[in-house]
């Protein structure tokens, strides 16, 4: 099996995946209406916002693809080894290496504000469903996301294989953005399941910055970032300390603007550097800046709590 078969320009899955995604979103929406849960699974306006953000993400990625390819090609030209794309051991090694690097990339995206400015877009949805999976920020390359994976072509994996494996990793993650799937028994020990990813997206204090894995959950267990869902709390979603928003442009750039304000108002260069590359919330926690606190637990939902305006189902 060649990883490039999944997401190369000629790969059938590249075109089938959007059809699968749309079909499953429609199915989840229909099931949520029939089930009539005690809380809304879908907010139509919020889901529409997620779709707009997803389209914007695809446009940006298309425009920047050539530029992002350059460092990967250069790294591969100076590779240390040659790994055949179809060798089973090479594919297994690429899978584990990609998963390991994705774990640290995802963890950094929560702990470094420059990266959180992009990743916070994904966490801004207040309803956890499949449309939240496609709510991906427009500024990923400005945040330097690609840098985490340059080591793979440098080691000797072909850039197309790297892109294919990353695509497979992200495709799997689409399916874990749902409340419709219960716990999956023994698989919970190894895989990043919907139950684990619900914890990752929750804004409850005990859930913040947990369960970073892409396909596997083993690195969270190894590095101390694994958490189960709290027993006596209902999971709440959205950004801690921030009101829900339905404006795609504001969702994508509000944290960058807040970061710029903190940088400009910082008294020392140390504070300026921290406002950009420190943990999200450090400026408000210590210096009264604009960043939302990541260690702040949202209050329990109430009728007066701000919610996106739309039809919840």
Image (tube, rainbow, N blue to C red):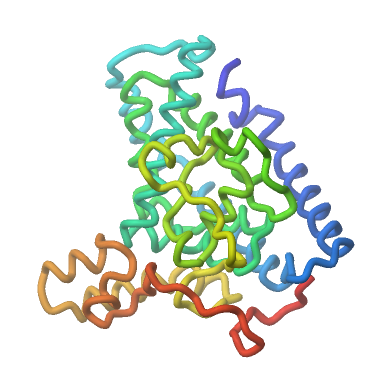
Residue shown at the point (39%, 63%) measured from the top left: 117
Quarter where residue 70 is shown: top left
Q: Can you say whether 74 is above or below 25 in the image?
A: above
- Judge by depth and name the residue closer to the eye, 108 or 186: 186
Quarter where residue 167 is shown: top right
Residue shown at the point (38%, 53%) measured from the top left: 109
Residue shown at the point (53%, 51%) measured from the top left: 228
How far from the left and from the top, in percent, is residue 293? 37, 73
- Judge by depth and name the residue closer to the eye, 60 or 100: 100
Q: Can you say whether 310 is above or below 102 in the image?
A: below
Instruction: Give the side of residue 276 with respect to residue 171, left or right.
Output: left
Q: Quadrant of the N terminus?
A: top right
Instruction: Give the side of residue 247 with respect to residue 68, left or right.
Output: right
How far from the left and from the top, in percent, is residue 34? 89, 62
Q: Quadrant of the C terminus?
A: bottom right
Numbered label tally: 0
- For this orientation, the residue located farthest to the bottom is 304
How far from the left and from the top, in percent, is residue 108? 35, 50
Residue shown at the point (73%, 66%) measured from the top left: 42
- Judge by depth and name the residue closer to the eye, 255 or 52: 255
Instruction: Give the side of residue 178 with respect to residue 220, left or right.
Output: right
- For this orientation, the residue located farthest to the front is 232
How far from the left and from the top, in percent, is residue 144? 34, 49
């Amino acid at each position: 099996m060649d990883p490039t078969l999944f997401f190369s320009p000629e790969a059938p899955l590249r075109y089938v995946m959007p059809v699968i995604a749309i079909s499953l979103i429609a199915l989840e929406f229909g099931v949520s209406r029939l089930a009539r849960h005690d809380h809304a699974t879908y907010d139509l306006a919020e889901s529409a916002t997620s779709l707009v953000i997803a389209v914007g993400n695809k446009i940006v990625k298309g425009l920047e693809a050539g530029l992002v390819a350059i460092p990967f090609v250069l790294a591969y030209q100076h590779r240390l080894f040659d790994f055949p794309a179809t060798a089973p051991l090479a594919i297994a090694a690429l899978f584990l290496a990609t998963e390991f690097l994705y774990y640290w990339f995802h963890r950094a995206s929560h702990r470094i504000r420059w990266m959180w400015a992009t990743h916070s877009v994904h966490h801004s949805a207040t309803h956890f469903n499949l449309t939240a999976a496609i709510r991906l920020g427009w500024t990923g390359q400005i945040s330097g996301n690609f840098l985490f994976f340059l080591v793979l072509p440098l080691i000797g994996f072909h850039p197309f294989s790297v892109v294919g494996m990353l695509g497979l990793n992200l495709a799997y993650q689409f399916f874990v953005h749902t409340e419709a799937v219960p716990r999956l028994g023994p698989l919970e020990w190894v895989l990043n399941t919907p139950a684990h990813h619900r914890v990752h997206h929750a804004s409850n204090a005990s859930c913040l910055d947990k369960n970073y894995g892409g396909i596997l959950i083993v690195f969270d267990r190894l590095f101390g970032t694994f958490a189960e869902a709290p027993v006596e709390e209902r999971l709440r979603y959205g950004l801690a300390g921030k009101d829900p928003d339905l404006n795609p442009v504001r969702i994508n750039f509000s944290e960058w603007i807040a970061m710029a304000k903190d940088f400009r108002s910082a008294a020392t260069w140390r504070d300026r550097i921290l406002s950009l590359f420190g943990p999200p919330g450090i400026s408000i926690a210590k210096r009264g800046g604009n960043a939302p606190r990541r260690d702040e637990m949202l209050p329990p939902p109430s009728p007066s709590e701000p919610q996106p305006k739309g039809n919840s189902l």
